[in-house]
Image (tube, helix red, strand yellow):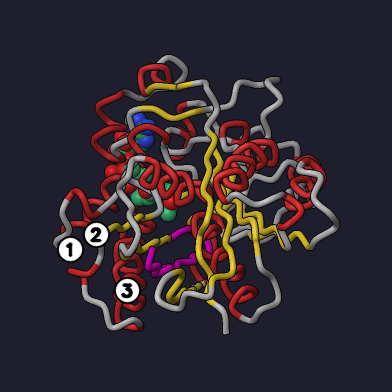
């Protein structure tokens, strides 16, 4: 049995900074409300017609991760791409990465577990490496939310939270059994699928052609819906459970955590978890203030930045934890 280790990380965010004050010019909102509820000060939103798409941002992050890993693109055996905002309804963006990076015809898997997508992707990659099937796997999380949000006052409860960006990791086979990914833990609870979804709550399955056929100006089924307070309550419970599950599996305690990287859902959720686990500011990494919630991209962007800033060192115990639409949640315990 092999072990898997992250050997390269990269991220990309679009240049266009959108502050809370910028949003208050296009909808009835304000900096104080957004900061108080979410901690977000600004986010990046792709400028239309700049050639940036979910797959292209993913490719930019991937190129940096590959270079830092010190491998050739042709050494990549498999691609995993997590997103809820693909360029096309189908096919998913994994194949676009294979084409854009000119990688030989390796498999490309698309993961759609929303905010837990990168954690799910990393877990799948870990299993492929541990069984010996693949040696190097490219795992990407990327989102282009800004084109799919309701940027009017009607949509303000959701649209102020989300940002665009991408992060990527190269997971590689390692003979060192003392370090790398120690364990991954995945969960789902589909009964809450409609609490955070792109659907009309209570209306069941509606597809684009149903919306067009109805031609109802009040139908906002093509914008995401979120029951914010319900999501908050479930998130704090599930984050705690899945972090504890990972620690217990590896006979670790909260004191062993050198760095917790929670999915950047909302600064208030991260702070709640930090307080509950009695972690210091140095033990938790947050960047939602600058990027908003970038769903599947949030953990790889935060992990890359924490690593770039020297906050993750060899031998550290790093915990990744996510919760999101589905509901789905998960954790990854890493000995760096
Ligand atoms: N600006 C100003 N006012 C707003 C805005 C806004 N952007 N959005 C909503 N409001 C108003 C509402 O209309 C409402 O007004 P009313 O009282 O006159 O009806 C008032 O603010 C309170 O609205 P609530 O929705 O009750 O606000 P709440 O305090 O619940 O905060 C929030 C909303 C921030 C979404 C909160 O529920 C929350 O933090 N939820 C956690 C979910 C989360 O973070 N999701 C992130 C994405 S999901 C994920 O990653 C897991």
Q: Which residue is mark 1?
A: 276
Answer above or below: position of 102 versus 113: above
Q: Nearer the viewer, residue 52 or 157?
A: 52
Whether the magenta-drawn stretch holds residue 53 is answered as no
Q: Are marks 3 and 1 in contact (CB under 8 Å)?
A: no
Label whose residue precedes the other's in the sequence (3 or 1): 3
Residue bounds of the magenta highlight = 323-336
Element on which disc 1 rests: helix
Mark 2 CB lies closer than 8 A to ligand 1:
no
Q: Are marks 1 and 2 in contact (CB under 8 Å)?
A: yes
Q: Which residue is mark 3?
A: 241
Q: Residue at x 29, y 57 (%)?
A: 259
Q: CA distance from mark 3 to mark 2?
A: 11 Å
Quarter, ligand 1: top left
Q: Which residue is mark 2?
A: 273
Q: Nearer the viewer, residue 10 or 30?
A: 10
Q: Examine the image and state in which quarter residue 235 appears.
A: bottom left
Mark 3, other Cα within 10 Å: few <14 / some 14–19 / many ≥20: some
Q: CA distance from mark 1 to mark 2?
A: 5 Å
Residue 149 in the image, given as x and y percentages of width and height = 56, 35
* Quarter of the figure with the N terminus: bottom right
Q: Examine the image and state in which quarter residue 333 appears.
A: bottom left
Q: Residue at x 49, y 65 (%)?
A: 327
């Amino acid at each position: 049995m092999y072990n898997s280790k992250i050997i390269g990380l990269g991220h990309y965010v679009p240049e266009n900074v959108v502050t809370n004050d910028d949003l208050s010019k296009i909808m009835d909102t304000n900096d104080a409300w957004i900061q108080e509820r979410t901690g977000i000060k600004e986010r990046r939103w792709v400028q239309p017609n700049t050639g940036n798409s979910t797959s292209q941002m993913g490719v930019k992050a991937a190129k940096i991760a590959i270079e830092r890993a010190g491998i050739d693109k042709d050494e990549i055996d498999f691609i995993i791409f997590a997103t809820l905002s693909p360029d096309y309804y189908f096919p998913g963006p994994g194949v676009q990465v294979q084409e854009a990076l000119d990688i030989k015809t390796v498999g490309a898997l698309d993961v759609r577990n929303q905010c837990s997508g990168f954690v799910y992707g990393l877990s799948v990659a870990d299993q492929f490496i541990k069984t010996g099937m693949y040696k190097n796997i490219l795992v990407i999380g990327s989102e282009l939310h800004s084109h799919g949000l309701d940027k009017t006052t009607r949509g303000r409860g959701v649209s102020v939270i989300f940002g665009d960006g991408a992060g990527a990791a190269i997971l590689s086979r390692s003979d060192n059994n003392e370090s790398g990914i120690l364990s991954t833990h995945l969960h789902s609870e589909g009964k809450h699928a409609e609490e955070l979804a792109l659907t009309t709550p209570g209306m069941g399955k509606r597809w684009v052609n149903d919306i067009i056929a109805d031609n109802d100006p009040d139908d906002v089924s093509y914008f995401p819906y979120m029951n914010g307070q319900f999501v908050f309550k479930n998130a704090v419970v599930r984050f705690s459970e899945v972090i504890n599950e990972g620690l217990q599996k590896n006979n670790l305690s909260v004191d062993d955590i050198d760095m917790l990287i929670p999915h950047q859902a909302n600064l208030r959720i991260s702070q709640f978890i930090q307080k509950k686990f009695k972690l210091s500011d140095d033990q938790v990494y947050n960047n939602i203030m600058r990027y908003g919630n970038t769903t599947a991209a949030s953990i790889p962007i935060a992990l890359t930045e924490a690593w770039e800033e020297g906050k993750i060192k060899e031998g550290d115990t790093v915990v990744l934890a996510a919760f999101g639409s589905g509901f789905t949640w998960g954790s990854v315990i890493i000995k760096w």
